[in-house]
Amino acid sequence: MPDQSSRHDRLRLARQRPRPDRIRRRSRASRGWQRFPWATTATALGVIAAIVGLFFNGIATYYGAKVSADQLKQSREDSDRQARQQAGRITFWIEDENEVGATRNIHVVNRSPDAVSEMSLAFSVELFGKNYRKPFVLTLDTLRPCAEAIYKPGDLGVYLGSGGAAKTELSGTGWGPWYLEFLDSNGKAWMRSHVGLVEIPAVSKDVAGFLSPSPKYPPQIKKVDNCSDGGQ
């Protein structure tokens, strides 16, 4: 009996021991995890994370630069609009000679609340059958705020060159308005013509001659309505 009992115990213990194939499979699985390239994988993930970070950083930089550019553009537009506020209120016009009773008077208007200076209204003039490539200019040193100067062509003498006697009156020539140049209250020079208003380096002095009112018939200066600091 003791021998049979002992044999049963040994058999039971033998069954509880792991078989060689189980040990080998467990050993192979353990070695597989150990052989996995953890360091390489970690490095690759780090590189991918860095690339993604650079991508989003690039997007943020792009939009940041775009916002800055838009702000700079808006600032320049606001500055230009402010600079043009007074200049946009300085105009000139000529009465239509085809209107009944019209004398084709010349009007120079300052609708701003500040004075303008060094005004030069340029004309193309045909004098004694000759057309001049350079303008004849009617000058006005200062035009006060909210004022309009009105000239009659018959009261304007035409002077060739820088001096001498008047050759004739403007009404006795073929003439037409060309452009108006002036300095605003900040000292900036502007030119207004039929194509619009532009800033220029300085008021031009390159002319063929001058127009000047007779001392007996100075221009009519009158106050204008709708005077403000708005520009166009």
Image (cartoon, rainbow, N blue to C red):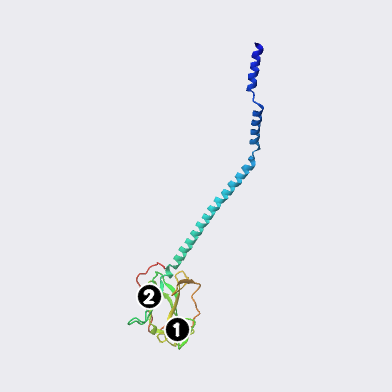
Q: Quadrant of residue 1?
A: top right
N-term-proximal mark, 1 vs 2:
1
Q: Which mark is residue 97?
A: none
Three-letter code for the amino acid on which mark 2 is drawn: Glu
Q: Is residue 24 above or below residue 76?
A: above
Q: Is residue 162 above or below residue 2?
A: below
Local SS, label 2: strand
Label 1: which residue? 125
Q: Quadrant of residue 103?
A: bottom left
Q: Position of residue 14 (x, y in %)?
A: 65, 21
Label 2: which residue? 148
Residue 119 in sight in this render:
no
Quadrant occupied by the C terminus: bottom left
Given residues 82 and 74, the one toward you in this image is: 74
Query: Label 1, label 2: how many angstroms apart (C-alpha)?
Result: 24 Å
Q: Residue furthest left?
A: 100
Proximity of marks 1 and 2: CB atoms separated by less than 8 Å: no
Query: Is 228 left or right of 6, judged from the image as shown?
Result: left
Q: Position of residue 24 (x, y in %)?
A: 66, 30
Q: Is residue 95 above or below residue 50?
A: below
Q: Position of residue 164 (x, y in %)?
A: 47, 87
Q: Nearer the viewer, mark 1 or mark 2?
A: 1
Packing grade of label 1 (10 A; few <14, some 14-19, many >=20) is: many
Local SS, label 1: strand
Residue 48 in sight in this render:
yes
Residue at point 39% right, 74% down? Answer: 109
